[in-house]
């Protein structure tokens, strides 16, 4: 990120997660309840394992907020790990008396376990897996939750929905994005196609029974972005790169596309480009005279928003911790073994969508704070309104 | 990037392109001929337009190199735009006498033209398109060419091949990557499947005749990477993110995946994870005792290399400048028009593969220089060898 | 910083201070008691006000540490503000019932109060001063305390001593730096000249009685640095810049010099340069054959360490909060008033020295982690020893 | 820097210097003649050696500028080294036939020579000194020259004057800064005290005759900055740090202070703080109602500008290359020798002042572009005017 700075800390079974978000304006109202809603969305979904039942995340803000309003100073967020109570000895930050906890030595394929061991030579793979765990993303959802509030004040809305799980595909209706968002909110898999949702649950149930896992594809849609955010003039300022890179930083996400990019790659240019249409009616009402009837670009052209909804899809591999574990090799004994188990989920595509929303909210907020005067929310809103008027006049 | 810094400058029809690459070790031998080979690879391919015939790029190094060896100081690279001779008046950096050049006012769908205008209000879209042009990537290929030389000294090889153009798919043989690379080098489309290559050319010819354009998918493969490069401990240090973000910074690339990520998303975990196999024979020879029989992870686990070939695919949309232009709106007159034309290609997927190689070479070099002592190439090679031995013993 | 990332958060009277330090190696033993010693040193010193009596800082590590050893993941540090108990209503992060706390409207000259108000238009200067307060530096001392432990494992020691307070100058004996450090440790003003220390206390007492304040100069000395850390090849990599910039980031520090730079500026080159002497005896013992008999460069040449002790001085202005307040203007009423009072100190030069040590420890750790392989402390120590041998052979 | 990115490249006797400055707005008029004026100012001054007579620097802009106006894309600047003609063999970027040039093996005290050798083990110290040379600052002056033009459009003026050379101190009259600037412009040492200037020249002449060198102190003054630029909320955003760090990145500058910081450190708070005065007359005219009668803070409070002139001083050590060389040790033979000579100056304090101006112009531009909307100069000027009005109303 260029203006905002985000650091997160905390292990999966340590005392909790900390995030510091530096660079916010003064004057943003932050209701922690609103952030907790996002944390709850991240935890839900058919196919989630036991931990989700143990704990319900909530955030505490310890810096940067006064009387519910940001100060413009760094915001510090704390999400306690309720599960830590079961791990006080093994995951104590401070030394403990007695012998060391039993080390994890049987790396799981698909995880950081083996390359992390090979990188560091640690004798206990827990020293790797505790931080490589997707638990860390709760801190990002908390920080992203703050950004969502900021974006909301600018009229920008973000939601996600699940396009496929385990090969079962949804066929959502894109003709009305508000309805699409509502439909996705009506089930715990965030699928905007009720029939597909049911089929997905059946598939999950069956695969779960086999001790196996599933991945899938989720799509984030952002509405309310004016044209011209982001930049074309330098490679590291293009929004495709910044957004895509942020989505690929989510554990288990290995593919990303802006709009239907892999499909577009097989088509002719005349079918892919979103033609520029004159919209006299809109112009008369003071809105932009430029219109598109299609959105195959996913809302980005030349590394910038083009005024259409932003559409980003992420491909998540199946959860790498299987309850019927795969073949592995013990790093200590050198014997062929089954990989270790950590309590885990069968699938978490809906959660991945929520985390994608959070990363995208962070990157968009970063871009907006970078491009507009943003000492205070008042400054920002005033600059934002002026820009939107400007764009509409052009 | 975290250790290396890369800035590029220069417009498509300006005097030339400049790149500065800061952070290289002292002592790397740089043959400019080797960089020119990469620049030539970027220019080739059936389906390229007239400009490729006008000019054959070559690089001049003006700083950071002495007697053919890097000094450890910033490297400055200059690639002249031979086409500038035809644009001396319109694209002069200095003011010119007489009236201004005729402005471009008819934005092309799919380009930076319209959002760039909406962002800045410029009266001449040439002020946007000259820098948003893919010409800029020649500077990246030059800088990436230097990184390739460094990687080669560490035993790391990079190549790319084209998987599909305009919906025509290649079926390359992955059983021998050396042979695959060689096959891809034998035609100007970089397709490691001769029959598919011919079909692609037929398709290109036909579409070109229609004044239309095509996109496609290219894949970069990197061999020689030991396990453990990159990091799992913080979101912005994961290699998936850094590599994917860099690929998405290439104009017209809108999708990226590490390994067959979109396919993996539809499968069960037990079919996707690359099981960890004990390789006693390798261990006896002093190589790593851990083996994988599959590589669905594309060489990355937990944001780190896992010792397998790195595999990254990029999806390129069709070229956005059509010789049978699409509908647009003139920004000055407000009339419905056809989009302007700039001299352009019908398709450039092979070139995109070369640019992907360059970006990936830059990111991998960045990661290696960050992680290993690299004041001099001697330092780096010694640290590299020691690490490879260490990994093999683990 | 280039490799390490440090964010801090927390207001002066908020719940506490948070720091996240990203980029540490795995395997560093961290005793929180050692960090608390530094926090205590930051709080001591004749001339400190009431708050220092209320609270004795201690750190809690909530992430990045397991069983007393770093994991290589981001370290999160928490220092509770004990004084917050007296401010739960006015400084609550969450909204409170009832009317808002009474705003601060009378800016103190020399503080962020007035420019912060002018920047943001806030109606309550407390929204500025809570974060602009030097309380924030406790978080830096905690983070720097971790770095000191790392540096100590490499044989690098850091201390500071006070050169002057309120115009009273110490004349410490530099012939034995160990003795100098010990002498500075024997009084709470950290002055390595007992007689001067007494005179300083008398001056402080008298000025304090007048409701006035004092500044002074402290000097940090770092021993154990081999030649060649830092870089000459790019402006933002020079250690003078990185160290000096970090010292100037401390509130109230407005001047910095490496060695006696302002004095050197008045002398001839032949008197300032530290001549390079052949030290045959050292060479025989396997130490560096190059020696200097003087250290007017303060240990840095060409932006790099030169093997001599590093010497950095900071000039602190008097504390800006006076108990006999200065003239001001009420931002609400527009009337001429006396500036507001916050509980404050008469002088805090010894504390400033400790904070300087912390910032310098952070920058040096950053430089070392950037330049040497540092996945684990074992890697780092091994690379460090190899480099020291190399330097001695050159 | 946070918004702007600056890389420079090029060796002292290589083909030339390159700079890329990324992040400028579209629409800034750049006259290269204006930049050349600054390059000329950097080269002048009694006490400069032969090279200044050989060459007169001029800049060529090869990217980011069209018809004399910035495009908002990265600006590339090229300053040819006319002296390279005398070094084509020894400093050729490409390999040359025949034997290698004779290596430099006798390090100069006070330079990067010895620590650079110790860091890298190079056999030819020229591989270090060519980039460590102050020649590189010409690229910064060129880039800073562009920033000065931008600042000028916002009503911000920068100048420097020399306060002392070789112990001879100027006593300039600060009552009228315009007159001070004019006086400093009337001699080639940039001393705003004609009598002191003459004494300095006599001193230089005498010391030069001895084969010795001198340093000194220069002061940069910036007028036209409104209150509230910079930030108090995070350590790395404070302007004292950013400005001071940038000044300390200039070769040979080892000390820096904002206002008379070292003097302030010896005084009482009541004498140092600039009291806040109600200025009813100014308020009536629409200017700020807050006034200061003193400026001991040097224009910065709480890491922000406070509306007063910004005053930054740098302390330069004497030039480290003496024509009567100091003692050294040959790195190859291990013999005690005299240090090598490179053609050099006796003193260059006036030039250092110009380079300080450039670095400060870069940092201030960076801060302003970061804080205000700055896609185009029109955007920036409009946001700037609005902010100045706002500050005046507060």
Image: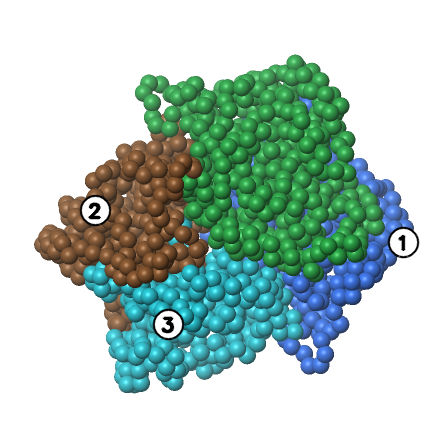
Chain colours: A cyan, B brown, C blue, D green
Please, is residue C111 above or below residue D187 in the view? below
Q: Nearer the viewer, residue C241 or D156?
A: D156
Question: Subunit of mark 1?
Answer: C
Q: Nearer the viewer, mark 1 or mark 2?
A: 2
Residue at which label 1 appears: C210
| Residue A281, disc | 3
* Position in image of residue B389 (x %, y %): 35, 47
- Discs 3/1, front: 3
Say the numbered circle drawn on residue B49: 2
- Please indicate whether residue B334 sits to the left or right of residue C76 in the image: left
* Viewer-nearest of discs 2 and 3: 3
Q: Secondary structure at mark 2?
A: loop
Give neighbour class at mark 1: few <14, some 14-19, many 20+ (Cα, 10 Å): few
Q: Position of residue D375 (x, y in %)?
A: 48, 53
Tell me if I can see residue A189 in this picture.
no
Label 2: few (<14), some (14–19) or many (≥20) C-alpha neighbours in 10 Å:
some
Callout 1–callout 2 Cβ contact below 8 Å = no
Q: Are marks 3 and 1 on the same chain?
A: no
Query: Position of C212 compared to D6: left or right?
Result: right
Rendered residue at 34%/50% (across/down)? B104
| Structural distance between the alpha carbons of marks 2 and 3 | 39 Å
Marked residue chain, label 2: B
Residue A150 shown left or right of residue A349 in the figure = right
Determine contact: label 3, label 1, CB under 8 Å: no
Say which of D362 and C314 sits in front.
D362
Judge by depth and name the residue closer to the eye, D212 or D46. Answer: D46
Determine the residue located farthest toward the top in the rendered image. Answer: D209
């Amino acid at each position: 990120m260029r203006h905002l700075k985000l650091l997160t800390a905390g292990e999966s079974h340590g005392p909790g997660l900390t995030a510091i978000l530096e660079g916010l304006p003064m004057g943003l109202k932050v209701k922690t309840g609103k952030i907790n809603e996002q944390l709850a969305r991240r935890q839900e979904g058919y196919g989630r394992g036991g931990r989700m039942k143990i704990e319900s995340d909530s955030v505490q803000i310890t810096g940067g907020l006064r009387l519910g309003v940001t100060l413009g100073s760094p915001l510090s967020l704390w999400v306690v790990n309720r599960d830590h109570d079961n791990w006080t000895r093994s995951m104590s930050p401070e030394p403990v008396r007695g012998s060391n906890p039993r080390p994890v030595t049987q790396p799981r394929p698909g995880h950081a376990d083996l390359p992390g061991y090979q990188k560091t030579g640690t004798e206990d793979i827990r020293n790797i897996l505790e931080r490589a765990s997707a638990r860390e993303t709760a801190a990002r959802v908390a920080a992203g939750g703050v950004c969502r509030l900021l974006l909301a004040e600018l009229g920008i809305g973000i939601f996600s929905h699940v396009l496929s799980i385990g090969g079962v595909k949804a066929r959502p209706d894109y003709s009305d994005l508000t309805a699409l968002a509502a439909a996705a909110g009506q089930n715990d898999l965030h699928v905007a196609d009720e029939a597909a949702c049911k089929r997905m649950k059946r598939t999950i149930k069956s695969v779960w029974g086999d001790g196996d896992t599933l991945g899938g594809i989720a799509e984030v849609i952002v509405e309310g972005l004016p044209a011209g955010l982001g930049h074309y003039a330098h490679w590291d300022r293009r929004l495709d790169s910044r957004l895509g890179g942020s989505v690929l930083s989510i554990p288990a996400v290995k593919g990303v596309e802006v709009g239907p990019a892999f499909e577009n790659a097989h088509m002719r240019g005349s079918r892919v480009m979103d033609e520029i249409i004159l919209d006299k009616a809109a112009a008369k009402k003071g809105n932009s005279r430029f219109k598109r009837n299609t959105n195959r670009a996913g809302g980005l052209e030349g590394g910038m928003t083009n005024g259409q909804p932003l559409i980003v899809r992420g491909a998540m591999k199946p959860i790498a911790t299987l309850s019927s574990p795969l073949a592995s090799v013990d790093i200590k004994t050198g014997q062929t073994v089954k990989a270790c188990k950590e309590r885990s989920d069968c699938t978490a595509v809906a959660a991945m969508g929520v985390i994608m929303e959070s990363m995208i909210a962070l990157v968009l907020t970063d871009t907006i704070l970078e491009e507009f005067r943003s000492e205070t929310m008042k400054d920002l809103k005033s600059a934002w309104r002026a820009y939107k008027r400007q764009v509409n006049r052009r």
